[in-house]
Image: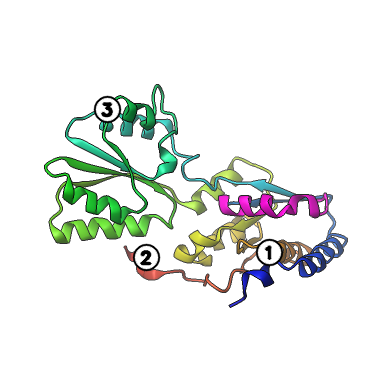
């Protein structure tokens, strides 16, 4: 296991950037458009200033990496409607509170008297359900493949323990279909930095069809500056060799098959 200091080493970063410049010279293309799918990658790239350090021919595109940002208005409207019911306590992660629906938000509904609670985990929501009977607890399940197994586990626990007032309004989304949809819409993307957290669950094999069918290199990347730079270099190496495949840079936590227990949940 590498330390964070190693993964943020400035001298190693310079060497990787030089390697990227050298590899670009081998390519027959003017620029390479790489989409980082995960919002955490986007944050890391901005925090470390990688966009300003990379050659201009490397164009980084931010993908659909925030589950809240890609949650449709209709879901919020449904949640707001539920929050207005006197027999319902609505539980949500804090990032959903201010997201606007068609004509209101959960924050506004709470100010008007709705019982909207912020929780830090689905386990907190399950405990809350036990304490508010006979009211019903509706938890807003918003997230990608990383969130879904924990919520599935909570539902199974609720069933086992007879907690019959615990409900989930699900808005879970899958990453690979979103990637395919972008390519089907002919968004110009040459390669993908695939998400690390999601890939812990679904495994790198989930991107095999994208690399195979769309001929787009896919590299599962970690979140530190050296992770991102090494992943970009791996993508450029694929392009230089004329191949498109799925590779794992983030080998310290991601494997090919993912977490099969979580997948079964």
Label 2: few (<14), some or many (≥20) within 10 Å? some
Q: Is residue 187 left or right of residue 240?
A: left
Q: Secondary structure at mark 2?
A: helix
Which residue reaches farthest bottom? 1
Identify the disc placed on residue 113.
3
Q: Is residue 15 above or below residue 36?
A: below
The verdict on residue 166 being magenta is: no
Q: Earlier in the sequence, mark 1 or mark 2?
A: 1
Q: Label 1 belongs to which residue?
A: 231
Figure quadrant of residue 81:
top left
The quadrant of the image that shows the C terminus is: bottom left
Identify the disc placed on residue 262.
2
Residue 173: percent from left, percent from top: 43, 48
Q: Earlier in the sequence, mark 1 or mark 3?
A: 3
The magenta segment is 38-57
Q: Residue at x 32, y 34 (%)?
A: 79
Instruction: Please state which of residues 265 and 50 is positioned toward the viewer in this rendering.
Output: 50
Q: Earlier in the sequence, mark 2 or mark 3?
A: 3
């Amino acid at each position: 296991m590498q330390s964070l200091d190693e993964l943020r080493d400035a001298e190693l970063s310079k060497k990787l950037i030089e390697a990227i410049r050298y590899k670009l010279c081998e390519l027959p293309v003017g620029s390479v458009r790489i989409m980082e799918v995960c919002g955490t990658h986007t944050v890391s790239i901005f925090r470390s200033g990688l966009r300003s350090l990379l050659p201009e021919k490397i164009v980084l595109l931010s993908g659909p990496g925030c589950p809240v940002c890609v949650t449709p208005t209709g879901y919020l409207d449904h949640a707001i409607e539920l929050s207005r019911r006197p027999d319902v306590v609505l539980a949500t992660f804090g990032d959903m509170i201010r997201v606007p629906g068609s004509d209101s938000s959960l924050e506004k509904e709470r100010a008007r008297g709705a019982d909207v609670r912020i929780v830090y985990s689905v386990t907190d929501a399950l405990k809350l359900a036990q304490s508010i009977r006979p009211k019903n607890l509706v938890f807003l399940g918003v997230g990608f493949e990383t969130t879904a197994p924990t919520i599935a586990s909570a539902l199974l626990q609720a069933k086992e323990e007879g907690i019959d007032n615990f409900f989930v309004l699900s808005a879970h989304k899958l990453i690979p279909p979103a990637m395919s949809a972008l390519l089907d819409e002919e968004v110009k993307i040459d390669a993908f930095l695939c998400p690390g957290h999601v890939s812990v669950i679904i495994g790198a094999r989930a991107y095999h069809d994208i690399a195979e069918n769309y001929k787009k290199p896919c590299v599962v990347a970690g979140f530190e500056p050296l992770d991102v730079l090494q992943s970009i270099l791996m993508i450029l190496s694929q392009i230089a060799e004329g191949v498109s495949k799925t590779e794992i840079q983030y080998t310290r936590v991601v494997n090919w098959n993912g977490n099969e227990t979580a997948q079964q949940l």
